Image: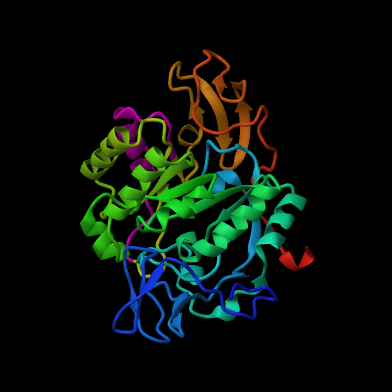
Amino acid sequence: MRQANHFLEPYVGRYWKKLEDGRILCELCPRYCHLAEGQRGFCFVRQNVGGQMILTTYGRSSGFCIDPVEKKPLNHFYPGSSILSFGTAGCNLGCKFCQNWDISKSREFDRLTDQASPEKIARAAKALKCKSVAFTYNDPVIFAEYAIDIAKECHKLGVKTVAVTAGYMTDKSRPEFYKYMDAANVDLKGFTEEFYRDITLGALQPVLDTLVYLKRETNVWFEITTLLIPGLNDSDQEIHAMSEWIAREIGVDVPLHFTAFHPDFRMLDKPNTPPATLKRARKIALSKGLRYVYTGNVHDPEGSNTYCHSCGKLLIERDWYQLGAYNLKNKNQCAHCGAVCQGHFDERPGTWGPRRQPVRLADF
């Protein structure tokens, strides 16, 4: 029943099975929603229709925009390049601090104004000279089948694909999804089960499992982002523990971004994250041996730049999303000492800069 004509037919998803009591079990994420006829999952976009799992947002988007890849944030994946970004609706987490709540929590499907086939998205990215397509704004895990189909079409045209995700998925869905992703930024929202349970309505361990899977079982380039919320996940103890776990389980070369919180959605009682908190977290992570630690959502040149892990010299200079000095040779070697900087780089950086350009898919 895959849609062939203007997405008028329902799209039957994967990662589910029928139960003896007549319901279906969603196996996409660790919620394992049990759905009766007509019922939607926690994510709101996967629904039991006629005893089958229907992905109600297949082929529909909340809008497209060209961003700098650094905004995802990815600092070691073709710096300076442009990336065509889009999302759908819904989410499988319930973060009280969600910064994209108008999209991720939307139950108004008329918000999904841009109808776009995977082929059209790939052609648009190619025509717009975007290096990559990003599945972002809401979590691509919940529209995995759509993201995979887009990735297949993108790869036919030499366009890369990026998942910006919370990594909240199961052993069953993880392999196929990441088989078609070139890069990912994974939100590690905190480092205690209590934080995940109380603040995100999820669980920590499946996210750690995703990170370990990415490192040990795939060639996907990935970076980690943690939004530091005053009084909730910004303690020295938690940052020490998280940094030690990253160094031990997935390695010191995985870039880590500490970003600043601002009051939003259902968390308006917390203050903005002080820049000093981000700098403190960065110092702790570096002390654990992590080589590439960044600060975000604040103007902090030192925390935005990439430095050589061997000689300490500046490799990539950043002012927000604008690149400055670029001291890599042979794509990924320090121009000063020759040490390898892990990631994916071209001979020269991209020149997209800080621009944000909305795109209408109807034009393609």
290 with respect to 113 (left or right): left
Q: Nearer the viewer, residue 43 or 305?
A: 43
Q: Position of residue 108 (x, y in %)?
A: 53, 80
Residue at (27, 53) in percent of width and height:
205
| 276 versus 25 height, above or below | above
Q: Which residues are magenta?
A: 269-294
Q: Position of residue 37 (x, y in %)?
A: 40, 86
Location of the N terminus (image quadrant): bottom right
Q: Position of residue 209 (x, y in %)?
A: 32, 49
| 249 versus 173 height, above or below | above
For residue 256, what is the image quadrant? top left
Q: Nearer the viewer, residue 323 or 47?
A: 47
Q: Nearer the viewer, residue 249 or 17?
A: 17
Residue at (65, 58) in percent of width and height:
65
For residue 229, what is the image quadrant? bottom left
* Residue 191 falls within the magenta-colored stretch: no
Residue at (48, 50) in percent of width and height:
178
Location of the C terminus (image quadrant): bottom right
Q: Nearer the viewer, residue 57 or 268?
A: 57
For residue 41, what is the image quadrant? bottom left
| 332 versus 311 height, above or below | below
Residue at (28, 51) in percent of width and height:
233
| 319 versus 151 height, above or below | above
